[in-house]
Image: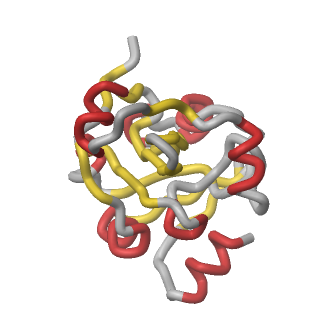
Amino acid sequence: MKLMDFLDRVSANYEVTEHLPTFTSQELAAQAHIPGIMVAKPVIIRADEEYYMCVLPACYKIDFDTLKRQVGANEIELADESVLAKLFVDCSLGAEPPFGILYGLLTFMDSSLEDDEYIFFQGGTHEKAIKMDMKEYMRLARPRVLSFCYPSL
């Protein structure tokens, strides 16, 4: 798996946990017994003709108008599953890790995650999750921090 190989190659400090299969970030939060705001989910978008990874809390949604203004795009839409399958060949669909850099994608992280002590996310499968210090994640993933999401109701 590309993510684990990368993390090990750069001697990253992280923890892997195994859990029952989860298919959404909110399910992962429930399995881990942590609030959804503490679990990061990657969402792949197409802005004009380019694909990007957006990283936001599991219990939040993207404000597409705000994101469009911030990235200077004319149109933004969610990437469809066929694109995800081509981009993330080493991951289970829906369990992509928030490391766009490993897949040739610029990563936008919502500012609501920036001050968190750690980041918790799917590790490429529906049964593994990864926890790492936010500073370590920021150093390795090199996301561009923007404000583009809001809490789900």
Q: Is residue 60 left or right of residue 5?
A: left
Q: Is residue 105 left or right of residue 144?
A: right
Residue at 56% across, 78% down:
7
Which picture quadrant has residue 119? bottom left
The percent coordinates of residue 124 (x first, y second) are 69, 56
How many marks are shown on the rendered structure?
A: 0
Front one among 48 and 27:
48
- Decide if residue 27 is in sight here: yes
| Residue with the most extreme top position | 153
The percent coordinates of residue 74 (x first, y second) are 36, 34
Q: Is residue 50 left or right of residue 129?
A: left
Residue at 31% across, 35% down:
67
Residue at 56% across, 41% down:
32
The percent coordinates of residue 110 (x first, y second) are 30, 44
Q: Quadrant of the C terminus?
A: top left
In the rendered view, tell whether residue 113 sits above or below residue 14.
above
Which picture quadrant has residue 126? top right
Front one among 141 and 24:
141
Residue at 76% across, 48% down:
85
In the rendered view, tell whether residue 110 sits above or below residue 129.
above
- Decide if residue 41 is in sight here: no
Q: Quadrant of the N terminus?
A: bottom right
Front one among 96 and 128:
96
Q: How is the image coloured?
A: secondary structure
Front one among 65 and 142:
65
